[in-house]
Structure formats: structure tokens, C-alpha cells
Amino acid sequence: MTQQITHAGLDEAVKQSPRKWVYLFTEGNAKMRDLLGGKGAGVAEMTNAGLPVPPGFTITTEACNAYYDSGKQFPTGLWEQALAALKVVEQQTGKGFGDKKNPLLVSVRSGAKFSMPGMMDTVLNLGINDETVQGLVALTGDERFAYDAYRRFIQMFSKIVLDTDPRDFEEVLDKYKEKAGVKTDAEIPAADLKKLVGEFKQIAERQSGEPFPTDVYQQLHKAIEAVFSSWNNKRAIDYRNFNKISHDLGTGVNVQSMVFGNMGNNSGTGVAFTRDPSTGEKQLYGEYLLNAQGEDVVAGIRTPSKISRLAQDLPEVYQQFQQIAQRLETHYRDMQDLEFTVEKGHLYMLQTRSAKRNAGAAVKVAVDMVEEGLISKEEAVKRVDPTQVYQLLLPRFDDAEKERAKKAGRLLAKGLNASPGAAYGKAIFDADKAEQLGKAGTPVVLVRPETSPDDVHGMLVAKGILTARGGATSHAAVVARGLGLPCVAGCEGIRVSEAEHLFRVVGSDLVIKEGDDISIDGATGEVFAGIIKTVEADFDKEVDLKKLLSWADGFRKLGVWANADYPRDAKRAVTFGAEGIGLCRTEHMFMEQERLPIVQKMILAKTKEERQAALDQLLPFQRSDFKGIFSSMVDPKTGEGYPVVIRLIDPPLHEFLPSYEELLVDVTRLETQGGHEKELAEKREMLEAVGSMREMNPMLGLRGCRLGLLFPEINVMQTRAILEAAAELAKEGKKLQPKIMIPLVGHVNELKEVRRQLEAVAKEIAGESGGSIEYKFGTMIELPRAALTAGQIAPVAEFFSFGTNDLTQTTFGFSRDDAEGKFLLKYVDGLEVPGSKDKVKILPVNPFQTLDRDGVGQLVQMAVENGRKANPKLELGICGEHGGDPDSIEFCHIIGLDYVSCSPFRVPVARLAAAQAALSRGEKDK
Ligand code: ADP
Ligand code: MG
Ligand code: MG
């Protein structure tokens, strides 16, 4: 390689073309990911940093797109540029492509802007034919190696380029292994390999219906086309759909000179992370195989060794690799995922990219890198995915219990860790049965060969999902993640029999029958027999996470509050960093066992007096509930109370009564049985009452503020309970911020009237307690009409809280339970098109999870603007589930809400997401 390397040919070819389609590795860099793809940009950057990278060139993603635009034709000049670049690579390596004496072999590797592991195709050892293989033999003096490379090439090329069935090749391989009496491919003797190559070619010809290409340029042309095509294979399309990667980015194609890890025991190949991707520990993590080619590590024929062992096997190589790894990490300022090959003691780097990592590692690496001075706090905050933070706080299996289960042989199989979280329940094999049991409160794990939209109703009530087939983007995985359910997918270690309602564990005689308890760990993919108890995550021990979140707090503008109905939840929310309660629902308090009969008495009261008597009984309960909530919401720094928004009663009253259908059954039974006169009379009375309250559409019926307008005594009692609780605590010297919120207002007059009621109560209490209680009065905006008339409502309210669950229901005209059970998930997943493999997506995401900016969002934004105009002091927040969704939080930041309120577990997610929203908008000062 001492001769002068000249690019003149390539430059000339580029000049003759409409565009530069081909970049030598020496011409690219890390910033060119869009054009070269991640792999191409990575090898170019390494090449130019002086690291040992086998020479090669990259065909641009633009060329891939041009190929598709022109109906699958190479764009003008592409082939000429590729040939010219190949000439440069020949000079760089001192070998000739197709040269009989000194052949250059290349790999043709896919590589898009965003890494799509395993989704697209790569061909190795290209450039072999009956003649060049002789050169390879002469050059290496290793006939076995040369013919092994040849047979691997035919096998890979046939599968990827000729699209043939790989099983026929495997069969022939097995036959030869059997004949030679050996176990692994690597032990097949050279003489047999030669014959095997002949047979392989015949299979390829038979299957593809054309002679196997012996012309190396034809091989290259076809391989490049195949890589272009792999951009649009089904796997790749599904992966992009799931990961929201655009379909028009295209893939780069990297043509790279081969290095061989299978040239004896001073050769090898491996993959490694610069830090441990599951713990974030700062140490090389990975594995390698001696005397093997790239694909062997993944194929799992031999068990790879831990990377640390390389220090003994090839000490110099290990040392060099360690240095390179460190250098790359510092250079990219992020944890890297590396591929390398050692050929006869020489180390070559084949790939570097930002490493995928689990939640714990993501947080630890980000925090460590700030402390190592590698990145800034802003960057650390931007790098961690908020949903990963959520995973860290999900319940997990108790470690000791899990260990015990493993020791007891209860680990049945391992599948894909498709959706995090841990769950146990009865194994149920069909969705209808799962629905039935789940609704009755039995914990259920739905087990299916794979799932389809027909199973969704069962998935909705299951604690977890287990499937035998399907990958990380299968229906089961996608839906489970959407629902926040643990899921183990593609668990090939089990065989599900739908007919027999059981699954068998492959390689053992274990059988799990319907109703048997199982446990699944969605974070690891493990499936266990029996129950493993789950434990809550201990936030206090998450030192790194707490540090990261405290940095995030310094960047965010949005306040983060929590939705909590009980003191226990409120306390947890404060631990997680909540600065207020944005929604405390009072109806849960009504549901408690000792109170429900009183609530029912109140509802069924025939006179005002009867009703008042029941309410008088409820008052002390509610007062102590509110005292509990107020006392739990204390700012740990100042000792003062955080704001607490309490919503007055909201659901239709019949929710507190027995079901009409059940009563009807009871009455009929008692009638036919005879006797039980007293019970029958009671039930009949209840049936009549419940019947008279039945509504066609309870969601749109007598509920929300409408209740308080028809039965003002309820509002009066609740207000009294809130203000008396506050007054009592105030006497103890506590500073509180009670806020009373009216649900489901559609017309300003509704709010005006409720306000009048409440003010009267407040005055009364002030008189009684000898001092006025500070409180704020506001409303939920959860009906389109309220949003549209926000300008009229705002002067009557001190705050708005957007109830985006109901606002989404009423804006779309969806009843959530009906929609999610019947059609909504199909809308998101895509509807089948008859006679086509394509699916038509009606909605990009579930609008109950991610705020629909175009529709619902527009209403919210309008209400914010008109509300503030009419009342500049108006305080604005959101309390729908969207308050914990990163995308929706970004929207809340953009439209200038004061705070988001979400479930306690989502508070850390919201803190991080709010900071990211602020940082991505370039507003770094709080
Ligand atoms: P993927 O994106 O699926 O990892 P790659 O293009 O990285 O596909 O290649 C698959 C395997 O082949 C990897 O192990 C890689 O290291 C190896 N490989 C690719 N090109 C070469 C080459 N020029 N020499 C040796 N091994 C290679
Ligand atoms: Mg790779
Ligand atoms: Mg509501």
C-alpha cells in the first residue's frame, strides 16, 4: 500500500453524473448521517480518526431514493461511480476485485440514518467464484477457509439476493456434518466443502431458475439492488412504523473490503458496548468468538466468550480495542456499540453507533457522563427518554423471590422483553374468557400463539400478555406497550395449543393448563410457573434518577402536579416531586364500604330532610378525608401546604347503586322462590329507584355540575367539608391552598349558580370560625362548549383545569370504553384492506394517550388564549391522563399552561418531559 492512491477516476465519474452518489470512507464524516446512513457515517468517522477500518465506500441514501423514484433503476452515474470507487479500494488494499491471484472480497452492508438492527440485509464475502476461490486458496494456503468462505457466500447471496428458501441449504449442511461425523460447520473437511459448494450452487440455480452469477460485477450489482430493496421489506416497514421513522429516508449501501475473523485462533469477531447497557457500569461489555465470521456470533452455534476474556486470548488486541473504545466514546460523547473483527492478530473496527440501553443504564450513563465532564446537564436531561423513567418506577419482581423461583426450576422459557413491568395471574388462552375473569377481578395473563385485534377486549383486562410468536413490533407488543401492560412476545420456548387450552414447555414435559398461575417479566422476557410477588420500585434509592430530575427541574417552566384521591397517593406524589394536586376526585371517598350505604340513602331520599340527614352523616367523613389530603401535601422545603384542587361530585348517581340487571335477577329469583317477603320488598323498591335513574347515555346525562344544580345540598356539604377541614388546619397554624373545582360545565350560567351556592357556604363558615378561609374557585374545561366560550367563563373562575379525557371523548364523539374495546385500537393499528397486505391507519395514535393537537388541542389552545384575555390572572393546568404523556406535555408547554397534573407514578416522567420541552424550545431560564 505504498503506492500513491488516486481518486481521479472517481472524480471524473462524479463529474459525468448528475450528482455524487458515492463517497469513499475517507470522504465522509459523522455529520453525514442523513446522506450516508448511520453505519456509513460511523465507518467514515472512524477511518478519518485514523482507526483501523477496512477500506470501502458508501452509496448514499439519495441514490436509494432515486432508485425507487425511477422504478427500481440505478440512477445515472451510480454504477460508474461505484466501479471507480472500487478501483480506489483496490489500490488501498492492494487487491483486485475478481482477480484470480489476489482477489478482493467485499461486504455489501445496509445502513440507514437510524439504526434498524436486523431489519435490513447484508451480504458478506462477495467477489468469490470458481476462479477467485483458487486465488484465495493460494494466498492463504488454507483450502478449508477458502471453500468455507465460498459456501457462506452462496448461502447468504441466495437468501438475500435470490430470495431462496434457506432451509434447503441447512439440510445439505446437516447431511455433510452427519457424513463427516462432526457437530459444527467449522469441522467439515475441505474436500467435503468443495463438493458442498457444488451442491449449494445447484440448489441456488434450481430455486432461482437462473445460473448462479459467476461474474463478480454482476454479483455486486445485484447485491446493491438487494440492499436497496431491503429498505422496503415487511420487517423494515413494520419497524419504521412502530418507531415512527419516516419511510422516505432510504438506506445507504456500504461496500467494504472483507477482513476475516475465521483464519485461525489468532482471528475472531465480536461486539462490545463501551459500558454495560443494562446497568450503565463503566466497563467494556460484550462477547466474541475466536476463529469465526461476523454472523456466527449472532447465529448461536457456538457460545461466545465474555469480552474480558480477550485479555487472555489476545492481550495486545484487547488492549488496543480498549483504547479505541475509550477514544470513540470520548469522541462521540456517548456510550457506543461496536463491532470488530481480528484477522491474524490485526484488529479492525467495523461499526460504531450510539448504544441502545435499558432504563437504569440510560439514567446512570447520563449522570456519570456529566460528572466525568463529558456532557452538560442540559444534554443529560435531553438524552434520557421519559418513558424509560416510567419503566424504572414500575413494579418489578422481588429479586429474592425470583431467584428462588429459578432455583426451584420454575423458569419455563424466555421470550422477547416486549413491554416492561412484571405481572402474575392465571394463564388464560382466549380473550373472551380473559375478559370475563378479568372483569370479575381475577388476575389473568392472556396467553396466545400471537394476538390480533380480535383479542383486544381480553388484553384490556389482563395483567400481562404472553405470546409464542411475533417480535417486538408484533400486535401483542404494540398494544401491550400502548396499554402499559407487561408483555413477553415471541416466546419460542413454549408451544401454545388453543384447542387444548394449555401450553407445553419445549424440551421438557412441563405443561401449563388453563387457570394455572404464571408470572411474566416484561423487562427481561422471562416466564415462570407460579406466582412471584411484585415489589414497588424504591424511588429513594434511585440516586442517579433523583439527581437527573433535580437538574430537569432547573430547566422546566411547567409546574408538575399529581392526580391523587387518597393521602397515601398524595404522599407518594410529593416523594416523586409533585408540587400540588391538580385533581382530587371526591367520589372514591363515597365508594368506601362504610359510606356507600349512607350515600345510597342520600340518593334514594324521598324528601329534602331525609337527604339532609344522610348528608349530615357524610360530612365528618369527607372533612377528615380532606384534612388527610391537605396534611399530606406539604412542601418539604417550606413546610407550607401545596395547592390542592378538589373536584366536587362528578359521576352519575346510579354508579353508587347496585346494577339494574342484577337487581332484576334477584327480584325474579325471590318471586319464584316465594317467602323472603321483606327482602323482596326492599329489592323491588331499589329496582324501581334504580330503574327510574337509568340513562341511555350516562356519560352525557345527569352528572358533573348538573348534579349540584339539581341537588345543591350535595355541593353545600362538600364545600363545607373542604372549608372546615382547611379552617381546622389553619387553626393549627398551617398555610393551605384549597381550590374547589366544578366539573362538566358547558355554560357560564352553570358556573355562576354554583359559585353563588359556594360563596354562601363560605360566608357561613367564616362567620362560624371567626375568620375567612382563603380558597380558589375554578372549573374543569372538558366540554367543547366550555372551551369555545372560555372567554365568558373565565371571569367567573380563578382557574381552569383541562379535563382532556372527557374533552377527547366529547370532541371525537367517542365513548372511551366502547371505542377502545371495539374499534379505536384497530384505527391505530390499521384496518385490513381486502386483497392487500397494506393496512389503512385512521389515527396515528390513541388520542386518549397522546393529546390530539389538531382537534382537541386546538380547543384547549383557544380556551387558554380567550380565558387569559378575559381574566389575566387565570391559572391554567391540565388534569387528563395526557398530563403524564411526554408528547402532550410538550404541547402544554408550547401553549403556555402553568402546570400539568398526572398520576403519581408519572410525576418523574412529567418533570423530565417538561424540561425537555423547555430545552428543545431553547428557553433555558426558568
Ligand atoms: P447488521 O447491520 O445487521 O449488523 P452488518 O452490515 O453490520 O449488519 O454486518 C453483519 C455482520 O458482518 C457483522 O457482524 C459485521 O461485523 C460483519 N461484517 C460486515 N462487513 C464486514 C467486513 N467487511 N469484514 C468482516 N466482517 C464484516
Ligand atoms: Mg452491524
Ligand atoms: Mg370528566
Image: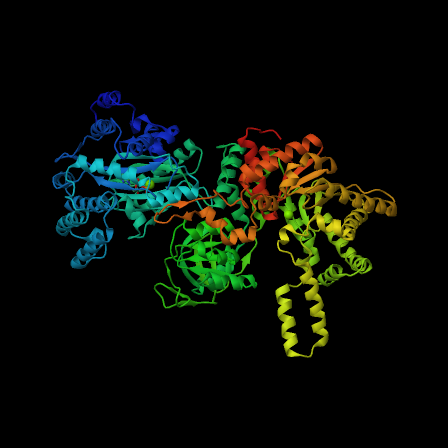
In this view of the protein, which residue sits in the foreground, 450 or 837? 837
Residue 407 visible, this orientation: yes
Report the side of 349 relative to 519 (left or right): left
In this view of the protein, which residue sits in the foreground, 515 or 348? 515
Label total for image: 0
Which x, y percent locates residue 707?
72, 51
Which x, y percent locates residue 621?
76, 57
Position of residue 838 relative to residue 558, above or below, is below
Quarter occupied by residue 315: top left
Q: Residue at x 51, y 42 (%)?
A: 363
Q: Quadrant of the C terminus?
A: top right
Residue 639 visible, this orientation: no
Q: Residue at x 44, y 58 (%)?
A: 466
In this view of the protein, which residue sits in the foreground, 284 or 701? 701
Report the side of 222 relative to 894 (left or right): left
Which x, y percent locates residue 146?
17, 43
Which x, y percent locates residue 94?
19, 30
